[in-house]
Amino acid sequence: MKTTIHLLILFLITNHTFSQTFNQEIVNAKGTANLTGKINFEKLNTAPYNEWFSKNYESYVPKKTIINDIKTNIQAYTIKIFMGTWCGDSKREVPKFYKTLNEANFPLNRVTTIAVASDREHYKQSVGGEQEGLNIHRVPTFIFYKDGKEVHRIVESPKTTIEKDIKDILSGNYTPNYVSVTKIHTIIETQGTDYLSKNSENLLNEFSLISESLYELNTYANVLFFAGKEKDAIEILKFNTLLFPKEADAYVSLANKLVITENITDAIINYERSLKFQKNEKINIKIQELKNSL
């Protein structure tokens, strides 16, 4: 009898916890609702999310020939989706992705979908911390696993179409967007921030060939910074100023983080460098305020 009661209590606690954390919704100060943590296909088909999800799901028509090509091999995979219900790219691509999976008869119980936040303190983080260790710097990100190991991922948007990118992933012939972020993430994880600092000049040529915009590493650094990895983020932003030495925003982004970490002198230096490439009265005022604070 005691065992039965204990099991019942455990079930009720587990069920209550699950109901609290699955399809969790948060409402910001403006009254806008967004999802956070683990969510599912059914929730995305309810208001207010169905306003964009259902429309984009129904309007997308994957190519049948490619669907037929991936139907068999995709069954060996599991998939994680990281998205933001506040994010325009997620609103566009996630419905297409689900439509493609359903057309390929892929069981949705093999898909884990996680909604991340947009506020600065929890930038692209999930309430359950599911993003930790997975290098989620842009959403949506679709990660494909086989035998428990990551095989590849689609980052932010497909290179061609969702179904064609999936076909290329299954065939082992795929290069995702933001190669520069993957590269610098590997450097930080395997060799550390000090290695990046000491070898920045030697790495410039390689990164100049794979970096299309200063915002590639800039966004990645923002994610790291607000995840508590300030040192890594600032070192990447310093490297970004070397990679894009004539871009004002590269210096401003670095300076903004230096202000937050109370490195005021270096922040002023980088704000002043930005003015060499773009006049900005707000930056001038910011510089004067910082100088007055010293």
Image (cartoon, helix red, strand yellow):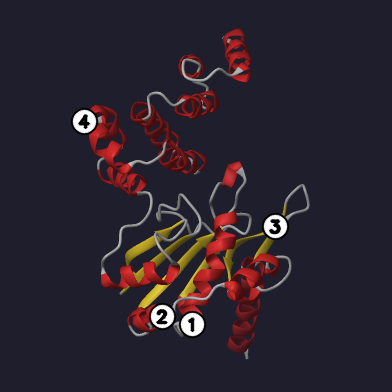
223 over 198 or under it: above or below = below
Alpha carbon distance from label 4 to label 3: 45 Å
For label 3, the residue is 26
**Which of the two discs, 4 and 1, sits closer to the camera?**
1
Counting residues from the start of the chain, the first of labels 2 and 4 encountered is 2
Residue 281 rendering spot, x and y as whole percentages? 62, 16
24 over 70 or under it: above or below = above
Counting residues from the start of the chain, the first of labels 3 and 2 encountered is 3
**Residue 202: image tag:** 4
Counting residues from the start of the chain, the first of labels 3 and 1 encountered is 3
Determine the residue positioned at 53% across, 63% down.
Answer: 93
Residue type at mark 3: give it: Ile
Callout 4 touching callout 1 (CB < 8 Å): no
Residue extending furthest toward the left: 202
Q: Is residue 191 left or right of residue 214?
A: left
**Which of the two discs, 3 and 2, sits closer to the camera?**
2
Residue 229 rendering spot, x and y as whole percentages? 44, 39
Counting residues from the start of the chain, the first of labels 1 and 2 encountered is 2
Within 10 Å of disc 2 (Cα), the crowding (few <14, some 14-19, many 20+) is: many
